[in-house]
């Protein structure tokens, strides 16, 4: 069971249909907090944990890390480009050791600790 951080409640990372609250990886919340601290503005959790049904509705891939509570999609007033660069900087400084994958979308970023992939950084439309 994850615990709230300074600026994030566990419930913000729960599935939108209300389930999955016990399934959230603390590392995702801690990463979101580190990113939020660096940005200095409120960060919105667009999507955290998803149950299989909700994941299908959102158009998530079948093996999405959101299913295991190890991923979050985040947005803020500074925009996805600034967030992406901030995450890169923090990672380079060793402040996001749990980060396994980061995708920059047009309006938000995806972060997860669902295991290393071939690449860490990706940009999608
Ligand atoms: Zn659900
Ligand atoms: Zn995502």
Image (tube, grey):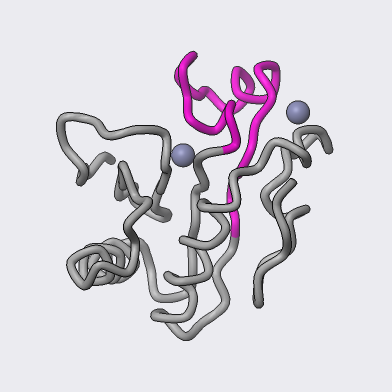
Q: Position of residue 24 (x, y in %)?
A: 65, 42
Identify which residue is drawn at 78% across, 53% down.
11
- Residue drawn at point x = 21 percent, y = 72 percent: 93
Farthest bottom residue?
40
Q: Quadrant of the C terminus?
A: top left
- Give the residue displayed 51% in from the left and 82% down from the top: 41
- Is residue 96 found left or right of 69 in the rendered image? left
Would you place residue 16 above or below residue 96 in this image?
Answer: above
**Quadrant position of residue 116:** top left
Q: Nearer the viewer, residue 55 or 95?
A: 95
Which one is in front, 45 or 9?
9
Q: Residue furthest right?
A: 18
**Could you tell me residue 124's position as x and y percent?**
26, 40
99 sits left or right of 20 in the view: left
Indicate the position of residue 91 as horizontal and vertical percent values: 25, 63
Left/right of residue 113 with respect to residue 13 in the rendered view: left
Q: Which contiguous range is marked in magenta?
A: 45-69
The image shows residue 107 at horizontal and vertical percentages of 41, 55
Toward the top, the furthest residue is: 62
Is residue 61 shown in magenta?
yes
Q: Residue at x 34, y 50 (%)?
A: 99
Q: Is residue 18 left or right of residue 72?
A: right
Q: Quadrant of residue 80?
A: bottom left
């Amino acid at each position: 069971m994850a615990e709230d951080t300074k600026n994030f409640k566990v419930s913000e990372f729960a599935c939108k249909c209300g389930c999955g609250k016990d399934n959230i990886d603390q590392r995702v919340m801690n990463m979101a907090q580190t990113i939020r601290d660096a940005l200095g503005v409120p960060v919105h959790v667009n999507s955290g944990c998803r149950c299989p049904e909700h994941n299908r509705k959102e158009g998530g891939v079948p093996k999405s890390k959101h299913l295991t509570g190890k991923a979050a999609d985040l947005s803020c007033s500074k925009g996805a480009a600034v967030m992406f660069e901030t995450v890169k900087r923090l990672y380079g400084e060793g402040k996001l050791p749990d980060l396994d994958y980061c995708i920059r979308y047009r309006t938000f970023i995806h972060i997860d600790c669902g295991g290393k992939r071939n690449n860490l950084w990706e940009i999608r439309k």
